[in-house]
C-alpha cells in the first residue's frame, strides 16, 4: 500500500511509502485491546462497541481527531499543520509543560512536550464495552528538543510524563500526568491546548460559537492588556482573542458549555491535582482572527472561522515535590 489517506474535517493528510498494519501486543488477547493502527506515526484507537475513534500522532502525543460513535468530529487541525516533526502540530490537543507561553525566555514557548516523540505503551491499550484507550510516555532523557532554562541538559530535575487517552461513544477523556522522579522540587504549569472544530465556519457568530460558565472568573486579556471580572454573558469571538480566565476562590474545576456551530454544543469538565489534592484550574480562550491567522505559516488564512481553543490548565505557581505526581484531566462530552 504505497499511499494512505486520512480524511479529516479540514484536509486530507497524505502519507506515502508507509504501511498500514495492526499492532497487537503478544502478552494479552487481541480482543482485550483497542484496535489501533500505525500510519506514519499516527495511531488510531477505536471503541468497538460504539464506533467512536481517535487519532494520536506520536510527535507530541498530539491527539488530532476524536469522532463520536455517530461520526461527529470534535477537534480542529489546520490544513497547513506540519505533521513531519518539524514543529508542534497546529491543532488537536497539544500538551503544555513545564510553562505556558514563555514567561521564562530561556525556555521554549509552552515547554518541551509538544515537540518530542513519545512512546506508546502498548500494554496499556484496551477496548471494553464501556470505553477504549491508550497511554503514551515521555521520559525527560528522551526529550531531545525544546529544552532550556532550568530544564536544559544539565538540569538537576527529572520527570516522567504520561498521557492517558480514553474514548467512548460521546466522550473524550485525556489526562496529562507528570511524575517528579527526582529528589528536587520544581515549579510548573500544565495545560491541554485543545482546538475545537466549529461547524459551518461559524466561530464569529456569538449565537452559535460561545463559552458559557466562566462568570466570576478573573480575566487577563492579552490583546487589550486589560484585567476584569467576567460577567454573566457568554464568552464569544469578536476579534483576536487571547484571554486567561482564573477561577474565583473556592472553584477548582472548570465546567463550561461550548457552542461549536448551529445546534451543536459540548460540555468541558476539567480538574487538576497534586498528589490527589485539587488545584485550581484556569481556562484559556484563544482565536487568532484575521491578521494573526495570516501571519501563522501553519494556519490557513480563513481557518479562524472554523475553530475555538478552550484550554484548561494549572497556571498558578504550583510546585511538585520530589516523588510527587500532578494530574490534569479534561472530559469533553458531545451534547
Image: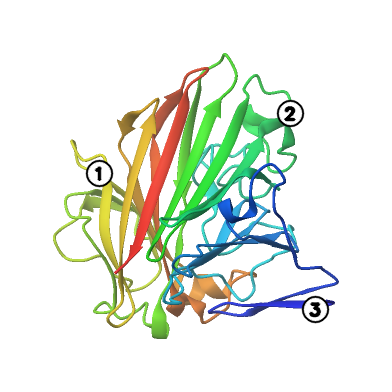
The residue that disc 2 covers is 153
| Outermost left residue | 232
Q: Secondary structure at mark 2?
A: loop
Answer few, some or many: residues within 10 Å of disc 1's Cα (few below 14, many 20 plus, some between 14 and 19).
Answer: many
Q: CA distance from mark 2 to mark 1?
A: 35 Å
Point out residue 109 in the picture as x, y percentages from the top left corner. 58, 47
The residue that disc 1 covers is 247
In this view, the residue in front, 254 or 148, is 254
- The correct choice, above or below, for 258 with respect to 187 in the image is below
Circle 1 or circle 3, nearest the eye: 3
Circle 2 or circle 3, nearest the eye: 3
The residue that disc 3 covers is 3
Answer few, some or many: residues within 10 Å of disc 3's Cα (few below 14, many 20 plus, some between 14 and 19).
Answer: few
Name the side, left or right, on which 184 lies relative to 208. Answer: right
- The correct choice, above or below, for 233 with respect to 178 in the image is below
Question: In this orientation, does residue 65 appear?
Answer: no
* Residue in the picture at 40% in, 66% down: 169
Name the side, left or right, on which 129 lies relative to 116. Answer: left
Coloration mode: rainbow
Q: Quadrant of residue 316?
A: top left
Q: Quadrant of residue 155?
A: top right
Point out residue 26 in the picture as x, y percentages from the top left corner. 72, 46
Q: Between disc 2 and disc 1, whose residue precedes?
A: 2
* Residue in the picture at 40% in, 86% down: 200
Point out residue 180 in the picture as x, y percentages from the top left corner. 55, 24
Amino acid at each position: 500500500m504505497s499511499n494512505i489517506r486520512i480524511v479529516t474535517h479540514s484536509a486530507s493528510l497524505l502519507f506515502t511509502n508507509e504501511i498500514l498494519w495492526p499492532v497487537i501486543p503478544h502478552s494479552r488477547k487481541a480482543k482485550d485491546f483497542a484496535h489501533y493502527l500505525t500510519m506514519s506515526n499516527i495511531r488510531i484507537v477505536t471503541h468497538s462497541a460504539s464506533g467512536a475513534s481517535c487519532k494520536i500522532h506520536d510527535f507530541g502525543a498530539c491527539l488530532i481527531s476524536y469522532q463520536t460513535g455517530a461520526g461527529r468530529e470534535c477537534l480542529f487541525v489546520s490544513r497547513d499543520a506540519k505533521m513531519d516533526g518539524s514543529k508542534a502540530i497546529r491543532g488537536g490537543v497539544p500538551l503544555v509543560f513545564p510553562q505556558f507561553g514563555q514567561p521564562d525566555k530561556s525556555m521554549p514557548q509552552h515547554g518541551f512536550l509538544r515537540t518530542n516523540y513519545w512512546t506508546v505503551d502498548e500494554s496499556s491499550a484496551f477496548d471494553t464495552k464501556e470505553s477504549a484507550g491508550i497511554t503514551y510516555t515521555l521520559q525527560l532523557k528522551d526529550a531531545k528538543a525544546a529544552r532550556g532554562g532550568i530544564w536544559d541538559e544539565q538540569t538537576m530535575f527529572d520527570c516522567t510524563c504520561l498521557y492517558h487517552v480514553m474514548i467512548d461513544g460521546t466522550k473524550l477523556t485525556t489526562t496529562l500526568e507528570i511524575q517528579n522522579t527526582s529528589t528536587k522540587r520544581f515549579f510548573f504549569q500544565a495545560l491541554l491546548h485543545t482546538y475545537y472544530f466549529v461547524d459551518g465556519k461559524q466561530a464569529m457568530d456569538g449565537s452559535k460559537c460561545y463559552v458559557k460558565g466562566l462568570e466570576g472568573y478573573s480575566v487577563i486579556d492579552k490583546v487589550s492588556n486589560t484585567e476584569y471580572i467576567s460577567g454573566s454573558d457568554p464568552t464569544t469571538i469578536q476579534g483576536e482573542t487571547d484571554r486567561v480566565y482564573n477561577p474565583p476562590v473556592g472553584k477548582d474545576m472548570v465546567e463550561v458549555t461550548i457552542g461549536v456551530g448551529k445546534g451543536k454544543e459540548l460540555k468541558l469538565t476539567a480538574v487538576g491535582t497534586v498528589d490527589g489534592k485539587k488545584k485550581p484550574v484556569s481556562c484559556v480562550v484563544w482565536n487568532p482572527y484575521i491578521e494573526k491567522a495570516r501571519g501563522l505559516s501553519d494556519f490557513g488564512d480563513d481557518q479562524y472561522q472554523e475553530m475555538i481553543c478552550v484550554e484548561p490548565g494549572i497556571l498558578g505557581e504550583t510546585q511538585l515535590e520530589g516523588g510527587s505526581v500532578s494530574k490534569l484531566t479534561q472530559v469533553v462530552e458531545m451534547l
